[in-house]
Each structure stands twice: as C-alpha cells, then as structure tokens.
Image (tube, rainbow, N blue to C red):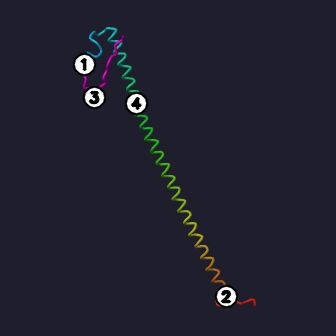
Amino acid sequence: MEQGLDIVIDFTGSQTPKEFDKILGDEKNSPERQANVMYMKSILELASFILLEEILRQNLTRLLYHIEIKRQLNKIKIRFNNIKKKKKRKEQRKLTRHTIKEKFNQKYLFFEDAPLKSKH
C-alpha cells in the first residue's frame, strides 16, 4: 500500500527550509524527494488556481451586483422622470384648459349676464 504525503501549506511564511526538508525527505537528489517536490508544486499550483478562481468569482459577483444596482437605479430614474413628465403634461393640460376657458369667457363675457331663454 502506498503511503501519502501530508503537506500543510502555510502562506504566512512561518515554515523554515529545514521543516520543508523534513516534509520532502532527507536525501537531496533521491527520487522520493523529487516526486514529493513535484507533488508539492502541483498542490501549490492547484491552490493558487483555486485561490485565483475564488478571487475572480468574488470580483465577478461584485461586478454583477453593481451592474444590477445601476440597472435598478436607472429603472427608478426612468420611472421618476416619467412621473415628472406626466405631472408636467397634466399641469400643461390644466393650464391650457384654464387658458381656453378664460379666453372663451373674455370673448363671450356678455353671455354670462344674459338670462337663459327657455324653449317653451
């Protein structure tokens, strides 16, 4: 049965080269040590890839979140502008009606004082 190599990756740099030598093996050029070094390199590459992937995923998530917030804000802004436009058009129509009514009253003012004629 093959014996596995337990490696603890310490990113703080507190492990000394002697501790790594103990992990890798005693003899400098032994095939076992070279295999352990290759194994450790592959683990470090995998760990760095996983770490990079996680960082990219978090950044992408953050970016998508900001894009969604901007999109929602734009929707709210458009809705608010539409409400303002509707209100402005309503005021304009009200003003136009009032102006037309005033002009009509000024033009035909003398009809207001005249009594209504009945058809009977």
Q: Which residues are magenta?
A: 1-17
Is the Cβ of the residue at disc 4 closer than 8 Å to that at disc 1? no
Q: Earlier in the sequence, mark 4 or mark 1?
A: 1
Whole-angstrom CA distance, mark 1 to mark 3, is 14 Å
Residue 11 within the segment the image draws in magenta: yes
Compare residues 10 and 105 and report the one nearer the observer: 10
The quadrant in which the C terminus is found is bottom right
Q: CA distance from mark 2 to mark 1?
A: 110 Å
Badge 2: how crowded within 10 Å, few (<14), some, or many (20+)?
A: few
Front one among 100 and 60: 60
Disc nearer the start of the sequence (2/3) = 3
Mark 2–mark 4 distance (CA, rounded to whole Å): 86 Å
Q: Position of residue 111 (x, y in %)?
A: 67, 87
Q: From the image, tell me which residue sits under label 4.
A: 52
**How far apart, in angstroms, are the residues tagged by discs 3 and 4?**
17 Å
| First-in-chain label (2 vs 4) | 4
Q: Looking at the picture, how far across and down is residue 74, in whole percent?
A: 50, 52
| Residue bearing mark 3 | 12
Task: Identify which residue is drawn at 47% across, 42% down.
Answer: 64
**Element marked by disc 4:** helix
Q: Is 54 displayed left or right of 23 in the figure?
A: right
Residue picked out by circle 1: 19
Res. 111 mark: 2
Instruction: Locate residue 46: give its quadrant.
Output: top left
